[in-house]
Amino acid sequence: MPEILIKNGFVYDPLNGVDGERMDVAVRDGKIVEKVGRGKKIIDASGMIVMPGGVDIHSHIAGPKVNSGRMLRPEDHFRDVEVKTEKTRSGVGRSIPSTFTTGYRYARMGYTTVMDPAMPPLKARHTHEELNDTPMIDKASYPLLGDCWFVLEPLSKGLIEECAAYVAWTMEATRGYVIKLVNPGGLEAWGFGRNVRNIDDTVPNFNITPREIIQGLCRVNNLLHMPHTIHVHTNNLGKPGNYTTTLETMKCVENLANGDKPVIHVTHCQFSAFKGDDWQTFESGAEEIAKYVNAHSHVTTDMGQVVFGDTTTMTADGPFQYILYQLSHNKWINSDVETETSTGIVPFKYKRSSFVHATQWSIGLELALLIKDPWKIFMTTDHPNAAPFIHYPKIVSWLMSRTAREKLMKKINRRAQHKSLLPTIDREYTFLELAIATRAGQARSLGLKQKGHLGVGADADIAIYRIDPENVDPSKKYRLIRRAFKRAAYTIKGGEIVVKDGEIVKSVSGKTFWVKPETSSSLKEIVPRLKEKFEDYYTVQYENYVVPEHHLAVSCPVTVKAEV
Amino acid sequence: MSPKYLFKVPVEAECVSPDVFAGKNLEEIGSLKLWEGNRQRSLNDLFYIEGDGPDTPEKLTIQVLGDVHKVRRIGAGMSAGEIFIHRDAGIHLGEEMRGGKITVCGNADSWTGAMMKDGVIEVKGNAGDYVGAAYRGSVKGMRGGTIIIHGNAGNELGCFMRKGLIKVHGSVGQFAGMHMKNGTISVGGNSEGRAGAEMTGGKIVVCGSVPSVLPTFSIDSLKSKAKINGEEATGPFYLFIGDITEEGEGKLYVSQASNPHLKLYEQYL
């Protein structure tokens, strides 16, 4: 591995307080170092910007439902074929790319870490097999725990520590990274054809409310000292008027905050910021959400930005996907994962001419621009739900340029134009804010200490874009920005140049992060009880459920000291 | 143009189209790239090419001689001009074409005119399955233009058809006009059954016999003739409306004379 010196680039490294200074970055053995010796490879980055490699906190890139989506949509793939080259494997793209293509396309945009946000614990093995085949990026997966019986049973009895023990065991068994909640309580109800209406509705058969599940798992998260907060897909997602539920969800963990540290991440917030009583009176609730987030430090969110066009929606929120099927009458998949969670997939087309879709487009940007602190809102599309991740450069241009927003604004539904808050917002992201929203903020929120910055000792994941910030005004030259972010001049992954001028020059396999909680030995007591439950509830035996560590291509455990 | 040898593996020849050939000299045309199996070749390696071409695709005619039944996607996406194939053509002929005309003197294979938007395809012989159909998984079938087949056609003719005309002088296989939304299919010969399954609109006329009509169609009336884009087919025809499972309003005309076994429907008129 040669030493690399990146010379004269404009460096944006928010975590170390570097804002566009012209400086050199040195790389040795996959890490950023003070300086390098002779025999180094020099990259002349003059007239270019240098940022840490991109981090994506929420992108469905692997797992059984992603694969089902691939099988459901041959028409999505056949126009977008990647031919095999000497360095890369063949594949197909569009809204649900094949695993290799996913890795290549992220790397081309300068992304180096991507998180898969929804892994049914039972399907962990499949998810990790797909992640093993996703090259170029470091990754992790979030097990879905908000409706798992192992969690609901102790929580309904108020046994937080016992619940924490189960969660700790699940993290290790499934090699998961974050506690993920999807429509907490609602998915369990969906197993019986029902749903929960608000966060104080009782979950059938469990005598527990979504509020108790969210608070309980938030306490568990604190007990285990997990690197990230709980990652919540709210109840009532995708329904008009749901912004009140979202605010309730944020409020219910207010008193669990410890200082300024966030305790809850409300993901793809755009889908949870709808106002109005029905689709006719539908409007944006971004202002209310932004007001709350601006005033509180315990919440982080991500955008879930809609980009117009054809995509495939897929979430663990089975009831929501059923509603989406009824709206679109498209082909669909819905499935139940034993005692754990559910899944739904519906192909969907976001149309500019549609009032609802155009308003959704507006809501995402309103959130990103009205929430003042970029450390609290990150750039995502909830790939592929609101748009495939290949559209990130477009979103960058909308964030950085009012002109770019206004240009598209003229083409969208008239009623949506009049109701949108965007014309009243002048804010444009700076390069530093963009670096926070696309890498530093996400890495800090995920607790990835070696990612998202260029300080000495950090992983040498670096993206270099062909933009000269001294001479280019992103507000006016938004097309240039779009082009530059589409094809990184260089992407460096783990100290190796993997992309040059938007083309893959080397294929590398990334690490898989997972949380290894260090618990007291008494927790081993739960294993016999677990085995009994596997006999009672599952089609799978305890022994076959656990994913062995050697099943991961490059395993990277993150040890946490748990308080149980 | 004519092939230099008998192709053993499929050749992907979407470059054989008046839009691509127009304004190029023989050398440039010869160096166009295409795939033979898993190898990329140039057109010159596979075909003898001669002639002179006008600059605009409208005036250009491509004559394809010899056996090209392994050559796929001829005329894919073409918008003007003409292609004349003297013998059999391969699959995906005229896929997504937007205009112009393709004539095949021999037989055409499956997916002929798949997802076409406009233009004319005329096949003197038989055609395979999925004529004018949508690609797998897609709901956008034929959206305009005309396909005329003088011989027989295979299964799932006009699957997900949305507009345009498919005229088959011979017989068709099963599921003609499946998922059809609009447009017209006319069959001179027989249908092997299940015509119009899950159709929501459009018109299918079968002048020959059908084994049976799907139970999800209801009889509407007895018509003396059926209109097919200006022309008329003389009946009398039974007119069925369906497919009820899709709340469809598609029209299925079935000849009375060729189908005496459908007489039992007359009691419901």
Image: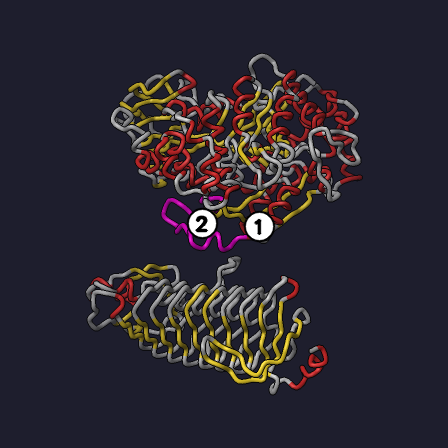
Q: Chain of mark 1?
A: A
Q: How much space separates mark 1 and mark 2, taking CA atoms?
A: 29 Å
Quadrant hosting residue A543: top right
Q: Which residues are magenta?
A: A73-101
Quadrant hosting residue B119: bottom left
Query: What residue is rendered at 39% in x and 33% in y?
Result: A398
Query: What residue is rendered at 60% in x and 86% in y?
Result: B258
Q: Which residue has dot 1 on it?
A: A328
Marker disc for residue A91: 2
User: Which badge, 1 or 2, comes first in the chain's sequence?
Assistant: 2
Locate residue A122, reporting x and y percent: 67, 39
Q: Secondary structure at mark 2?
A: strand
Question: Which is more toward the observer, A522 or A380?
Answer: A380
Query: What residue is rendered at 63% in x and 62% in y?
Result: B247
Relative height, residue A133 to residue A363 (above, below): below
Number of marks:
2
